Amino acid sequence: MYYEEAFKKMMIKSAGDILITQMNSARMRDLIHNLDPEDELDLAYYREIRHGFVKTNEGSINYAYNDKDKKLSRYDGVSPLNGGSVTVGAGFNMSRYGKQNEARREWNEIFANYSNKPDFDEVYNGRATLNNEQIDILLDGSLDIREKELRSHYGIIWQDLRMNER
């Protein structure tokens, strides 16, 4: 039992970096299918897999950019978006299709307890960038908020969903 928990703890740290790049979606689904959402180690492992999956598929860029611009040029805060969205990090949508205040509220909620809180408007207008820690905090916070919204939407059914279905 002790060795199994120690092994899981070691795997949690490297799961996002190693496993995600080597697995396809079906294999990841199978890997997390039997995880117990009530088990702390399983939950931590799930969060690492979820984080790594999104970051691997979405990419990670430390400056705001128009996600429709294939060159991923830094957004200047004033150029027309032409149907795109101002995005930063691993897919955080700062413009929310005209609902920028909603994105700002979420940003402030995610960074509320963070001593080195990046300024939303400075990043949005291309005058500031995020460091890797800030990108990870933003991603995990966003994923937690989306999962909370899904939990609310599905109600009592949520507790019956397997980890890979969540």
Image: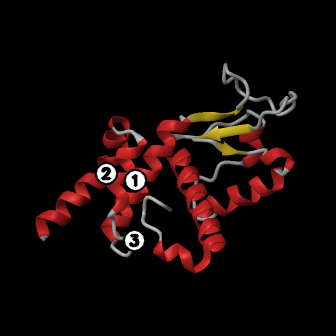
Q: Is residue 108 above or below residue 91?
A: below
Res 87 → quadrant:
top right
The residue under label 2 is: 13
The residue under label 3 is: 37
Contact (Cβ within 8 Å) of mark 3 with mark 2? no
Q: Is residue 140 left or right of residue 77?
A: left
The residue under label 1 is: 48
Residue 46 spot, x, y in % from top left: 39, 59
* SS label for mark 2: helix
First in residue order: circle 2 vs circle 1: 2
Residue 83 spot, x, y in % from top left: 83, 33
Residue type highlighted by circle 2: Lys
In this picture the colour scheme is secondary structure
Foreground tag (2 vs 1)? 1
Q: CA distance from mark 3 to mark 2?
A: 18 Å
Report crowding for label 1: few under 14, some 14 to 19, many 20 or more residues within 10 A (C-alpha). Answer: many
Q: Is residue 161 above or below residue 107?
A: below
Q: Residue furthest bottom?
A: 156
